[in-house]
Image: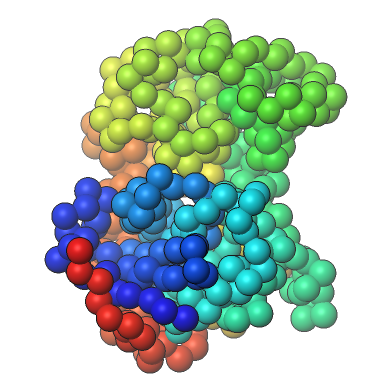
């Protein structure tokens, strides 16, 4: 396995660089390149998924892995997990170029961090890919339940999408209570959901059970057909119309960057709260929502049910559990349901600090993870991390 540690002096020139602890470039095959970025390990091993997509070039891939790994530090901190933030990306078409050999090579790449980075599925990868990765490293989570049943861990494994939706549901309920001072509930509200894939559909069903009317849009016709079948009180609109429908809540559950200058101007809602990652195209859109009197629930807070799910699986498999969590499914679900309280705390703090909610969430997360020592400087790693930070190759200078 050939890899290069990227030179911090070069990384500092990149917009998304944020004093990351470690960034490595891997040659996974003759024509496939991957990157792993560890942003911060003050709270524990850096957990973040493995994404595979067709980046335009290596520069775009590096930008993405830096941005996403930083986001995972904030997400894990606000989720109350003893985990830092990291991410991995593979440059390639997951439908045409992904092979078991490439995923096994990514397992070797993960293993090179000696436990300081833990991977899971993300866009372009799934449970079967985590199985391939697990052949080369134990630092992987989100494995199929059938792989874990023999170890009595099965109840903590599997697809995290339902728990992502559950956490989002509780976050939305908390936002409603805050916005309307307990004067309204979902039974008389309309929620516009952008994207009814695995998470969006599960969220829509939970909201509809409480009496909410759902307006949905998706570029995938099969997703829409299934949503119509499983949600009775639903209206379907075109993908470009979802931003301008009259509703109480807008729930982005598709790709990131949906909230920009144009789309925010179109919104006719009181609350934005959804499961998509990186919903704001730029940081200043947080303030733009405030100016429109729209309450924004920070995405990485409300959608953290999935990382809580895979986090609990990792704690039980690795026996790394510094906060003494009860590693049973009921406790994990209760932790996810606690996202509602976290949302309430953030919205209250934003009000007290007279700051946008996104900026407030960032401040609260930084208060959690900025203190302490990096994992590589400490002996608290659940497994030997003595090889973390060793090159195994030459530094890349560009």
Left or right of residue 333, residue 279 in this image: left
Q: Which residue is at the front of the view, 209 or 131?
A: 131
| Residue 187 visible in image | no
| Residue 123 visible in image | yes
Q: Quadrant of the C terminus?
A: bottom left
* Count of numbered tags: 0
Where's residue 219, x and y in %?
63, 25
Please say if 219 is above or below 145.
above
Where's residue 236, x and y in %?
70, 14
Q: Residue at x 58, y 80 (%)?
A: 137
Left or right of residue 282, residue 237 in this image: right
Q: Residue at x 21, y 52 (%)?
A: 14
Where's residue 347, x and y in %?
39, 36
Q: Which residue is at the front of the view, 61 or 322?
A: 61
Q: Residue at x 71, y 33 (%)?
A: 201
Please say if 391 is above or below 65.
below
Q: Residue at x 44, y 47 (%)?
A: 55
Where's residue 379, x and y in %?
37, 89
């Amino acid at each position: 396995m050939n890899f290069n540690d990227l030179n911090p002096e070069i990384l500092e020139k990149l917009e998304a660089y944020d004093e990351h602890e470690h960034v490595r470039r891997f040659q996974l095959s003759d024509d496939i390149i991957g990157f792993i970025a560890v942003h911060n390990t003050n709270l524990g091993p850096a957990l973040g998924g493995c994404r595979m997509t067709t980046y335009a070039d290596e520069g775009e891939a590096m930008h993405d892995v830096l941005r996403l790994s930083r986001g995972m530090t904030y997400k894990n901190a606000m989720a109350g997990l003893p985990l830092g933030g990291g991410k991995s990306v593979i440059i390639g078409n997951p439908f045409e170029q992904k092979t078991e050999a490439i995923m096994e090579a990514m397992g070797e790449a993960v293993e090179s961090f000696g436990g300081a980075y833990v991977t899971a599925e993300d866009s372009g990868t799934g449970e079967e890919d985590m199985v391939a990765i697990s052949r080369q490293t134990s630092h992987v989570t989100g494995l199929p339940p059938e792989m874990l049943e023999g170890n009595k861990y099965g109840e903590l494994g599997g697809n995290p999408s339902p728990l992502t939706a559950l956490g989002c549901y509780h976050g939305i309920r908390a936002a409603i209570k805050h916005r309307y001072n307990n004067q309204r509930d979902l039974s008389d509200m309309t929620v516009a959901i952008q994207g009814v894939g695995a998470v969006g559909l599960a969220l829509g069903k939970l909201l509809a059970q409480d009496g909410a009317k759902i307006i949905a849009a998706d570029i995938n016709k099969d997703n829409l057909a299934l949503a119509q079948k499983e949600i009775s009180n639903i209206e379907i609109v075109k993908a470009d119309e979802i931003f301008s429908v009259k509703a109480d809540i807008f729930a982005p559950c598709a790709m990131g960057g949906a909230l920009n200058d144009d789309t925010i101007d179109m919104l006719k809602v009181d609350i934005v709260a959804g499961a998509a990652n990186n919903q704001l195209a730029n940081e200043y859109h947080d303030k733009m929502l405030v100016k429109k009197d729209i309450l924004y629930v920070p995405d990485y807070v409300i959608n953290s049910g999935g990382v809580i799910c895979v986090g609990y699986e990792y704690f039980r498999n690795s026996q790394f559990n510094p906060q003494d969590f009860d590693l049973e499914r009921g406790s994990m679900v209760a932790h996810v349901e606690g996202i509602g309280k976290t949302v309430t705390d953030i919205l209250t703090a934003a009000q007290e600090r007279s700051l946008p909610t996104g900026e407030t969430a960032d401040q609260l997360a930084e208060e959690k993870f900025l203190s302490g020592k990096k994992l590589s400087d400490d002996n608290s790693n659940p497994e030997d991390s003595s090889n973390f930070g060793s090159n195994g190759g030459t530094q890349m200078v560009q």
